[in-house]
Image: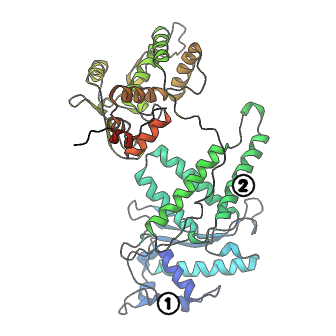
Amino acid sequence: MPIIATQNRSINAIVDDILCLNSSSSLSSGTITDVLEGVFSPSTNISQTFSNTAAALNYRPCKLYMGCSKKANKPDLSRQWFVYYSYRNPNTGKMERQPPIYRDINTFDTIAERKEYGKALINIYNELLRAGLSPFEEFVSKENGYLNKNIISCSELYLSEKKKSLAPKSFASYKQHVDWFIDWIKENRLSHLNIDQIKRHQVMQFLSDYREKSETAAAAARPSEKRKPASNRQINNIKDNIITFFNYFKTNFEDEITKNPAKGIKDLPHLTRGNKAYTDAQIKLLKQLMLDHNPRILAFCEMVYESCTRPHEETRFLKIADLDFDQNRIHIRPELSKEGRSEWIPMSSVYMARLKEYVKGYPDDHYLFSVDRHLGANKFNRIKPGPLVPGPTPIAEWTLREWYKAIKKMAGLDETWTIYSWKHSYCVRAYLDTKDVYFIQIKCRHTDLSVTCKYLRNLGLFVDLNMIADNVRSI
């Protein structure tokens, strides 16, 4: 099995080939040198390549971590072993620690065997680094689609790709769940497996272990911490994100990854409250209570209602520069959008005219909703929330929650009602007033009309496009 020489192959991919060519747990430098002849052109003198001191300046040689704790300072078979090294980032010029190299090292049960295998890995990687190969090469070859299928490497590739397309808060959820899964893989000494070797029972065991771990932590917590174990809904969310992780590779590398081991795992039973919209009577009551007791929260809720934005993730971070008064629309910046892309929301001209007066005289980089705490200070110099005005910092999430909690209590509403319910209220009214499903799709920034129909059905509005089509008169 010859090594394919290509710029796009990663250093780990070449190591895969070397390990396939020689199944021995230790390789001599001469054997590695012979193998490397296949990477370079025949005219290249491999010994001259090795003597290139410029390459040596770009990396720190590999070392073996043997699971040693700081106190014991001796090899520990109960912990993960790995090879590590640092390489200079060509973009920043700084030395960066590269991801741990596990390979099959943790499949060995004795210290001697792990040391022998670790020494072999160190020899291989050091020779490749001396030859000038860089870990900053692509994981995936644009030419032949080669994929380094090790589960650890795949998780790194997946998260790096997801980070490019998702807003920071949405990405954080994906990363947390994938990281938990990879931590479980390492703890159970499975880090040597390729992604197509992961089985469904292992994913199910991970979910079961996570649930048990959360229950143990909740039981051990102090009463003041009020810690709850993971709910069935949370377990289902983790499972769904693990399915998405495997689907990424099944979709993009269908020739190498043919099945998703997590697909088919059933959801745990849980209560689905669904979206809730305020009735006209509730809207009238809440508006009057906010006018009488806290007009600041009314201004914020009105923006959520008019823009159909997510209150804590988007509305709080809207800036004056995001308002387009010429075309009566609001810009949702990519870092705020759930999908990580630039989006526009059509707005009422009447409401935009009021916003124009509200932001008059403030700089474009100010957030729409900020609390002037200086104006809120009383004669005892105790800081209290002042008026809601544009400012350099966005209003705090906890401030909004506390304000609205007080209003809900006065209205006799329980915790299932939220500021988010104002968005749902707008959509219900928009459908009842216009019957225009497409407008609601654009307003909510849904990618597909079927998503909008499902959303409206969840609000109790049974939209049936086929029934509507049947009602159109024939020629």
Horizontal arrangement in the rendering, residue 212 relative to residue 239 (left or right): right
Q: Which residue is mark 2?
A: 209
**Is residue 362 placed above or below 236 in the rendered structure?**
above
Name the residue rendered at 52%, 15% in the picture: 384
Is residue 37 among what the camera can see? Answer: yes
Name the residue rendered at 58%, 70% in the picture: 101
Viewer-nearest residue: 77 or 276: 276
Q: Quadrant of residue 140?
A: bottom left
Q: Can you give x and y, in whole percent of width and height, for residue 20 in the image?
A: 56, 85
**Is residue 33 placed above or below 387 in the rendered structure?**
below
Number of numbered labels in the structure image = 2
**Is residue 39 placed above or below 264 in the rendered structure?**
below
Viewer-nearest residue: 294 or 387: 294
Quick check: marks 2 and 1 in contact, CB under 8 Å? no
Viewer-nearest residue: 255 or 397: 255
Name the residue rendered at 61%, 60% in the picture: 182
Q: Which residue is mark 1?
A: 1
Q: Can you give x and y, in whole percent of width and height, for residue 59 in the image?
A: 48, 71
Is residue 446 among what the camera can see? Answer: no
Judge the density around disc 1: few (<14), some (14-19), many (≥20) Cα neighbours within 10 Å: few
Q: Amino acid at mark 2?
A: Asp
Q: Can you give x and y, in whole percent of width and height, for residue 172 in the image?
A: 52, 47
